[in-house]
Image (cartoon, coloured by chain):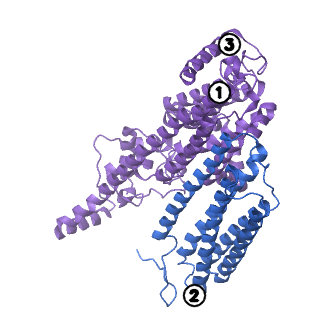
Amino acid sequence: MQRLTMPARWLQLLLALACAARTAPAMAHGATIGQLGWNWEGWVLASLAVAVFGYVRGLLRMDAGAREHVFGPGRYAAFAAGIGVLFVALISPLDALDDQLFSAHMLQHMLLILVAPPLLVWGRPATAWLWAFELPARRSIGRFWMGAPGVQRGIRFLMRPLAVWVLSSFALWFWHLPGPYDWALDNAWVHAGEHLCFFLTALAFWSLVLAPYGRRQLDYGSSLLFVGTLGMQMGLLGAILTFATRPVYLAHAHTTLAWGLSLLEDQQLAGLIMWVPAGLVYTGTMAVLFVAWLHDAERKAVTAMRAGRRTRALQGVGTLSLLLAVLALSGCHDKAATSPWQISGAQPARGPALIQHYGCGTCHTVPGVAQASGTVGPPLTQFGQRAYIAGMLHNNPDNLMMWLRDPQRVLPGNAMPNTGMTERDARDIAAYLYTLQ
Amino acid sequence: MTEIAISSTTLPVGSKGRDASGWWGMLALVATEATLFAYLLFSYFYLASHSPPPWPPNGAPSLTLAIPGSLVLIAGSVTMWWGERGIERGRRWQLVAGLLLSLLLGIAFIVLEGIEWAGKPYTLSSSVYSSLYFTITGFHLAHVLVGLLILAVLLLWTGFDYFDENRHSAVSIGVIYWHFVTVVWLAVFFTFYIAPRLG
């Protein structure tokens, strides 16, 4: 019967929390047992404020088109929600409650590991923060980054899946041992360090899993293993806490009864929070990854089919077609000939401006477009005569427009980023590229 | 489509680079063995949370032999990594040296562990803790022995000149297992020697 009443008590507790939020405005961190207040700690508030300010400023500085392409409402909403969750975890009375209840503390940790980071990562804050600076400052940040290979290598090393996995596992087990746990409760700085450990490893974890910029460092199969093995560790820890027959975290010994929970019940509740809701997040993430994996496989099959169909068609029709094709190709070499690809309804004249707008010239050399002299990707000179796109797709309008609009879907992980090009723009750019003979 | 993989006049033995079914076989083996150890360590914490304090009953075990043991195993992983790098660049002597050093370090670990076992006042069946201790470190020791066997076979094959910079998949596959044994030891070490000091 004891266990049946536990959810009811938890509900009671949430209600109490809501009441406390209304009635107790400024109470010191964990002041009185059974009473809670908001934790208006300066540096937490300041960090959140700077994060939001930088994000909004960056968005405002971008021109509307670019903003729409890089962000879009889903990304802003995710970032806002992530900040909201951080606010609940670190400033609302939940933060004061974590001194008194182990279960509340674990709930806070789950918010810091499993809820806030994925939302924030999805919001692409790094791009927005970079844009918060003026152009010269952005340039010097870029120069600093390019001039510091050691920093780059260090970050790349820390972002390696194995490193993230090891650090996340270590943080999880280390901070839940009774010794370090009590230490964190005793010392506010250690406590902040504990939360920072969870938060930073979680940011790295979710960056790898969600791949917010579309380029997956970890393929889908490995991502599943990555998420599954970390989720399993969380589940095992939850199971240990749920099934323990004695209380392990004695720091809360004098505070849990005020909330109607014995020390052991509080610990069991904490274990269940780590086991069930957290397990749902991991399982849900794995389900999403599975679906994405299937979509990806399908896309690859479609692309291969598209690339292969023309070859087969060519083989099937026989020598005559081959001869005709050769004739047609040799015709292409004639400078006077028009492009073999006419795209109906397209306005090739819009091409140069659009190419400039999407920044293609950063990586490609494009004839007839001002400042388009990049050397990262292949030059687009004589594009109308080229046989392949990305060394893989046959060069025809359908394939070109598909490639321009979503290169990451066609060939995941390749160097060309998705620019969020509209269908009409892709059509006009393709038409312009085919005028290059 | 041409790829020059054969640079010597005699035909080499084994797959090119890591493209071998043994690679996947080893990854699968590591997955099953990692799961085994995950559940062994889980049972340690589970039984600890069910036992009346103090845990461990005789206090946290001494680090005098465990820290040198850990360092020896880590060093063995480093020497093996160095040896593998050698054969990737076609330096057979470096692989031989790496294998020999790793073998010696592995044997040193077993000796240290043996001394530690001999000094324990309890046996496998004395208490929950002693069962856990001997079962888990024993399982790990068995994995070290298998690792030594793998290294010995690799050393023999290197002696037969089976490997060069193109064909050394057996080395790469064996090395995964050897690193795995080190990583498992670090988890065992953290559980038995560090965790009680933090509890």
Q: Which residue is mark 2?
A: B160
Q: Earlier in the sequence, mark 3 or mark 1?
A: 3
Q: Secondary structure at mark 2?
A: loop
Q: Residues within 10 Å of mark 1 (few under 14, many from 20)?
A: many
The blue chain is: B
What's the residue type where badge 1 is placed?
Answer: Asp
* Quadrant including the N terminus of chain A: top right
Marks 2 and 3, Cα distance to the nearest angstrom?
A: 77 Å
The disc numbered 1 marks a residue on which chain? A
Question: In this figure, which residue is indicated by the disc labeled 1?
Answer: A266
Numbered badge on residue A20: 3
Q: Which chain is purple?
A: A
Asked if residue A365 lies left or right of residue A351, the reply is right
Same chain under badges 2 and 3? The reply is: no
Q: Nearer the viewer, mark 1 or mark 2?
A: 1
* x then y, percent, for residue A33: 75, 17
